[in-house]
Structures are given as C-alpha cells and as structure tokens.
Image (cartoon, rainbow, N blue to C red):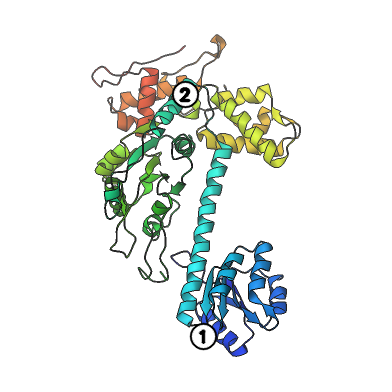
C-alpha cells in the first residue's frame, strides 16, 4: 500500500488484440507493481472477469468484430464499479463521448504513451481509494448512531441536548468573495469532553444533524487511529511528488468536509507538530497540501472531542495552550452514564430494538430483573460497555426474556470487595436501613481524595482515576466543599 492509499497490487484486466502492444503494456503495468491479466479478445476477457475481481479494466475499442465500448456497457450494467480506460488508434470525439456516456473513465489515443497510461491508472485507483475511505467513515458513523443514538430523559442529558441544539445554530465561518482566493476566516469550534464511551461522537453527529449544514459532509476523524507518519497527508492532502510514492495529488479530510463539519475525535492524542498546523487552519480557515505552496480557503464547523484533561496536558507541555483556547470557544461536558438516572434502561431498550431488527431476534426483551441490574450498575465504560453487555445477552440468551444473569454484569453486594479501605472505619453502611447507592461511595471517595491532597482538585481527580472536568462536575452535583483551609466534610454512615 502506498502512502497515498493507492494499491500497488491492483488487479487489472487488459484487453488488447495486438499481441506486441499487449505485452508492452503488461510489462509496464507489472513494473509499476500491478497484477495484470491479459486477454486478446472479449471472450477471454469475459472468462477472466468471471473468475477474478478486478480493480480496473484497460481495453482497446476495436477488437476484431466486437467493440470494447459495448463491453463497457456490459460490465457497468453488471455492477462493475472499478475504473475503465479505453484505447484506440481511431480516436474520435464521437467514440470518446459514447464511451464516457456508457461508463468509461478515461480515453487514450494510440500510440499509447506509457507515462500517460500510468498517470491515468494511478488517478483512477486513487479516486477509488478515496471513495472506499469515505464509505468507511460513513459506515463507522452509521454504526455509531445505530448503537448509541441521542437517547435520554434525565436532567443532565436534557441539558446536553439543549446546549447542542443551541450551538448547532451558530453559523460556520463565512467565506466571502474576497476570501475565495488566498485567504479565509476563523473556523467555528466546539469542544466536547467526557469519559470514554459517554457518547461524544453521538453528540457531535447530533450537532451536525441539527445544523443548517445537515445535508453537507460530516467527516469523522479518529486522531488515534491515523498513522503518525501519514496523519498530515490524511488531514490536509498532498501534491504529486510530495514524498516517495506520492504519484498523484490527494484530497485531504479537511477538503472533504468543506462546508460541513469535521469531527476530530481524541484530539488529545494529536502530536504537537500537528497541533500547530491545526491551530493555523482554525485561525485562518486556510489549508495547504503537503508539498504545495498554494493555499486553499475552507469553511466548516470543527468539533473536537477528548476524554483527557487538556488543562493538565497544557501544564505538562503535552498540548498547546493557544489551541485549547481556540477549540474551547464553545464547550459541552457529557455526564457519565451512571449520573443519568434511568437513561441506561432507555438506551438499553433502544439498543435491543435495533439488534432485533438487524439480526431478526424475534421478541427478545429485558426482564424487570435485568432492567434493575442495568439501573444499578455503575457502567465504567458508559454507553459503549452497555452496548457490549446488551448485544452479548441478546445473542446468547436461551429465551426471549433477558435475565440479569444473561447480562453477565457484576452487581454491588455485601460479599463484594470495594476500593474503599474499611479498616480505617471511615465508611460504613447498614444495609438493614435501606438501599445505598454507588453515588454515596463515589462521593466519599472524592472527599477522601480531597482531604489527602489538601483540597487540590487536579491531584484528587488523578488519585481516583477521573478526569478533572468530570471531577469538577461531580463536586457541583454533590455540593462538596473544596476549600483547603476548611477541608472537605467527613462523612460517616452507620
């Protein structure tokens, strides 16, 4: 695989009745790294086509008593979506127009210049690669919406949705006529924070779908998944010859998102050199391909998301402070699933409904016992963990009613060990008095961490493995005192 995404082992069907030319073209394409299957007639081509998958067809127009142009129509009607290049010694405008109408992608006149042929081949294969890449992003996006749509009725989740709807109406950066040449304008930015699996991607998509740009591109970029050596080319594109094996110009993801929304997921994992370039794009609304001196203005909404504490990363020189200021122009902090009341059951029922439709699972449903288990479980992995549990239970359940045992989630109980040191005598529950919740344990854990750090919120959050933003959200929710001089209140429950 080349750096620009073109497959060096593309499978090409070459149809040419001139044996010498067929051998010459075959050797040229073979030296470029392609696999070539040669056919001297349409009969041989049809036989080969029925036995193998081809990425591209290169065919002569005049093949004895048959026409390569008619073969174009034949394979297109049969569903072939790869590239098609036509060649002829009798290049006419009429032949070219007819071939293009029937589905050919390019048209070369004989004698064929090998360099021109290679350029055309690379261009068509690169276009196919971009199409596959875009379809992949679309599939991932559909899968994400399928498994965890914006569902919830709790107060914290309603606040998130209301904020998202308001932010969706903020216009993307305008690009006026005078900007259409070499300069642009600052891009609209929104930062979404929250724990892993809390639904940041779902909210980003909801923002786009609620905006006036809903019919324009939504490009989801996972900053963690992109190879470090290729991420700049992926984001901004590159020019032909920009680096080894860059045989053609490539469009970047920012160009694909122009006019719509680009979602930079896990932005905290973006390398510092790329952070600088991203800051420039956001501030000026201009991109420049790798290896190019030309600038291109873009306009779009930039949504960034992370489960990391970017403020702490700034202090540790792992994230640019000026970039944080830019992407945090508007922000949304997502509550963890355990803080959303009965939303877990609502989401689980929607997931189960989707799974029934997709896999034909009949009338499988959640029992009251299972719903109770879902409500009580802390869901450290949030919606993502919930989906895994529901999917597993739906697939493996031995009846139409899913029990709590089918969910295979551990529930808190008297026999379970807890992360609290009971030997200190600081936390005791009398279960004869009634139900005690995970929120009570969480509050006590936070208070002890604050006492240990003398009221330092960042240090306390780090001690219990929580993001600083999530920690602060819970401080307000539980109304916990954070003044180091006063100290956090000591809670002893009998």
Q: Is residue 11 above or below residue 305?
A: below
Q: Is residue 275 left or right of residue 85?
A: left
Q: Is residue 445 left or right of residue 328?
A: right
Task: Return the residue nearer the eye: 398 or 152.
Answer: 152
Task: Return the residue nearer the eye: 463 or 69.
Answer: 69
Q: Name the residue under label 1.
A: 111
**Residue 395 visible in the shown view:** yes
Give the image location of residue 290, x and y in percent: 34, 62
Q: Mark 2 points at which residue?
A: 158
Q: Is residue 41 above or below residue 53?
A: below
Give the image location of residue 191, x and y in percent: 36, 37
Task: Return the residue nearer the eye: 324 or 203.
Answer: 203
Give the image location of residue 243, x and y in percent: 36, 69
Q: Which mark is residue 179?
A: none
Give the image location of residue 463, x and y in percent: 36, 33
In the picture, residue 71 is in which quadrant?
bottom right
At x 59%, y 90%, the residue is 20
Q: Is residue 460 left or right of residue 414?
A: left
């Amino acid at each position: 695989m080349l750096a620009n995404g073109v497959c060096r082992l593309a499978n090409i069907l070459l149809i040419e009745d001139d044996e010498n030319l067929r051998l010459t073209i075959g050797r040229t394409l073979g030296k470029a790294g392609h696999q070539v299957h040669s056919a001297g007639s349409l009969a041989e081509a049809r036989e080969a086509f029925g036995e193998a998958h081809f990425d591209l067809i290169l065919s002569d127009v005049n093949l004895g008593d048959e026409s390569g142009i008619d073969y174009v129509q034949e394979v297109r009607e049969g569903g072939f979506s790869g590239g098609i290049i036509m060649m002829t010694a009798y290049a006419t405008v009429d032949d070219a127009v007819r071939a293009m109408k029937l589905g050919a992608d390019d048209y070369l006149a004989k004698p064929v210049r090998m360099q021109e042929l290679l350029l055309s081949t690379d261009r068509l294969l690169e276009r196919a690669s971009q199409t596959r890449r875009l379809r992949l992003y679309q599939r991932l996006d559909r899968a994400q919406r399928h498994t965890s749509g914006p569902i919830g009725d709790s107060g914290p989740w309603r606040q998130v949705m209301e904020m998202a709807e308001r932010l969706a109406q903020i216009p993307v950066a305008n690009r006026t006529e005078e900007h259409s040449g070499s300069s642009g304008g600052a891009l609209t930015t929104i930062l979404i924070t929250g724990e892993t699996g809390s639904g940041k991607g779902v909210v980003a998509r909801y923002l786009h779908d609620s905006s006036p740009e809903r019919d324009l591109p939504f490009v989801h970029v996972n900053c963690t998944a992109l190879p470090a050596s290729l991420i700049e080319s992926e984001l901004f594109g590159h020019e032909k010859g920009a680096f080894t094996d860059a045989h053609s110009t490539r469009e970047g993801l920012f160009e694909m998102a122009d006019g719509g929304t680009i979602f930079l997921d896990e932005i905290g994992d973006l390398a510092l050199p790329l952070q600088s370039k991203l800051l420039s794009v956001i501030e000026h609304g201009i991109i420049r391909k790798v290896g190019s001196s030309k600038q291109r203005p873009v306009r779009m909404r930039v949504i960034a998301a992370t489960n990391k504490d970017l403020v702490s990363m700034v202090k540790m020189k792992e994230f640019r402070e000026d970039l944080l200021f830019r992407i945090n122009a508007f922000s949304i902090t997502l509550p963890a699933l355990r803080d959303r009341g009965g939303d877990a059951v609502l989401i689980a029922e929607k997931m189960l409904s989707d799974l029934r439709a997709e896999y034909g699972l009949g009338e499988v449903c959640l029992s009251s016992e299972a719903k109770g288990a879902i409500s009580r479980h802390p869901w450290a992995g949030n919606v993502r963990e919930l989906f895994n549990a529901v999917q597993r239970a739906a697939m493996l359940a031995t009846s139409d009613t899913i029990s709590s045992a089918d969910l295979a989630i551990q529930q808190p109980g008297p026999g379970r060990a807890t992360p609290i040191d009971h030997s200190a005598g600081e936390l005791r529950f009398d279960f004869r008095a009634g139900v005690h919740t995970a929120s009570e344990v969480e509050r006590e854990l936070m208070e002890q961490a604050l006492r240990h750090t003398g009221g330092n919120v960042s240090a306390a959050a780090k001690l219990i493995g929580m993001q600083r933003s999530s920690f602060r959200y819970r401080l307000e929710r539980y109304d916990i005192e954070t003044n180091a001089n006063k100290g956090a209140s000591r809670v002893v429950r009998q």
